[in-house]
Image: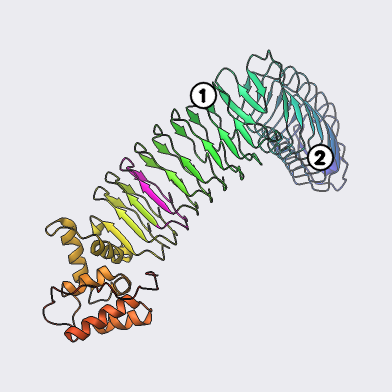
Amino acid sequence: MDSDFQIENGILVSYWGEDPEPCVPDGVTGIGDEGFAHCGHLTSVTLPDSVVRIGARAFYSCWNLAAITIPDSVVSIGKEAFKDCANLDLVRLPAGLTHIPDKMFLYCKRMKTIAIPDGVVSIGKEAFCGCADLALAVLPDSLACIGYRTFQGCKSLKTINIPDGVRSIGTNPFIGCTSLSSVRISPDHPCLACRDGILVEKGTGTLVSCLGGRNKADCQVPQGIALIGDDAFQGCMGLTAVTIPDSVVDIGEQTFAYCPDLTTVTLPSAITRIGRAAFLGCRSLTEIVIPGNVTKIEAYAFASCAGLKAVNIPDGVVSIDKYAFDNCTGLTVVTVPGSVVNMEYHAFASCAGLTNVTLMEGAAWIGDEVFFKCEKLMNVTIPDSVSHIGRNVFAGCFRLASITIGSIGLLSESVRPFAAVGFAEHPAAPGTRRYAEHLDYIRENVAEHALIDAAVHRPALLTLLLEEGLLTPAVIPAYLARAQETESTQGTALLLEYQRRYGGGPESTPDELRLDADLPEDDTGGE
């Protein structure tokens, strides 16, 4: 019934009828933006020859829509027109169409075939993304441009022909096409080539895609490639090793992201850039040697590489961006070269296995929460060159025991006791700024028991307190009680020995006091 449609100036604005197979009235010239959106009861729609335009998201989320014939009168279709039409199977596109818009069939999971009419010159980004059942896509000779991630997640697509007229191809159009083993391209194609499952853009020397269905554990990037493009290997299941030639100078964004079986990558010295999230989620990668010409480790570059046990950060890197090594739970030791002037938010956060961190002289800026929740981190060395330490840098580092740092004033109050330990274990020369600052802090905080937990588990700090006469008879009982309560065998033995010799704390501290070599080992490990 015509009363089921809201039509304004020839444009169907909305449909509120209950008929699952409505026929749009003759004379309607356009389906407006979201005209049928969220009509979940629709199974098919008949459009008249008077329609020339279909707006953006016109049939968005019509999840039961199974078939639609678009008349040849239609020359324009808006973006996301059939997005989330999960049961859409049969679609006939109009002969007058020249462009497939962005995300036109995004997540049309049941679509099995699509024939793009001759005359279409471009396919927009993610046009068929998530069409899991799509097994056949016919591309016309008129096609000149294939957009960004056009066929991402088309798991049933096994082969596709790319016409000679295609001159531009976006970021890996075949991510997640796990069955795709062949892209058929004429050997005389002026712009593209595909050999051994590797799609290459000839003019730019860019590796565009490693096909998800090539079913080979190793990959040799062809000599002459200069850039491995964004997403080129993303999600390649079963890929274990990649060898990259000296011709490559740039690795793009998310290039090897989520390759769960990748264990070995050889990076040549010519590489100058490793892009954002380049190895994100490569959980089997155990070691990476970053080439010396790389000056910046970009955001998320190695995040969630859970198997990564060793990383070589070369002298020459000046910046480690946010989340660069976040959640690398296998890392145990990190040395940051002095060339690194900036470490950003969460750069090494949630590295649960990290125990020791050393920043070399020259490092200048440590951002907020850089080592957040590094639960096994015990020892940190921070050079005098560091001028800024952000908020919550060591929050959640429950086993932190020692920080060696030039200026204790850079640290938050909550972690200054660990700097006192670092000072005791790596003494500074009297008269230096470090010596004065640390000793003043220790002297001011002994009576308030701010150092009690650190001292009873770290013999060097406890010995320093006693040697400097900072533990008075009034505070020694509290320290002894805490040592016994927390089962610190070394701390307990040292305090009892001190009391035995000097009766709880003399006015002047004896020079001969030292931790006896045969005292029992501390079973608590400073936890």
| Left or right: 297 as drawn, with respect to 176 | left
In the rendered image, residue 223, in percent from the top left (x then y), is placed at 55, 22
Q: Which residue is mark 1?
A: 226
Residue 503's disc is none
**Image quarter of the N terminus:** top right
Corner quadrant of residue 65: top right
In the rendered image, residue 423, in percent from the top left (x then y), is placed at 24, 62
For the point 80% across and 41% down, which residue is it?
Answer: 110
Q: Is residue 411 visible?
A: no
> Where 260 falls versus 213 (above or below)?
below
Span highlighted in magenta in the image:
332-355
Name the colour scheme: rainbow
| Left or right: 2 as drawn, with respect to 146 | right
Corner quadrant of residue 482: bottom left
Q: Which residue is mark 2?
A: 88
Question: In the image, is residue 341 part of the stretch drawn in magenta?
Answer: yes
At label 1, counting other C-alpha atoms closer than 10 Å, the crowd grade (few under 14, some 14-19, many 20 or more) is many
> Where 145 falls versus 444 (above or below)?
above
Question: In the image, is residue 453 part of the stretch drawn in magenta?
Answer: no
> Where 129 falls versus 379 (above or below)?
above
- The secondary element bearing badge 1 is classed as loop
| Left or right: 193 as drawn, with respect to 506 | right
Classified by dominant secondary structure, the portion drawn in magenta counts as loop
> Where 226 falls versus 242 (above or below)?
above
Amino acid of disc 1: Ala
Corner quadrant of residue 170: top right
At label 2, counting other C-alpha atoms closer than 10 Å, the crowd grade (few under 14, some 14-19, many 20 or more) is many
**Image quarter of the C terminus:** bottom left
For the point 14% across and 82% down, which residue is it?
Answer: 506
In the rendered image, residue 361, in percent from the top left (x then y), is placed at 27, 46
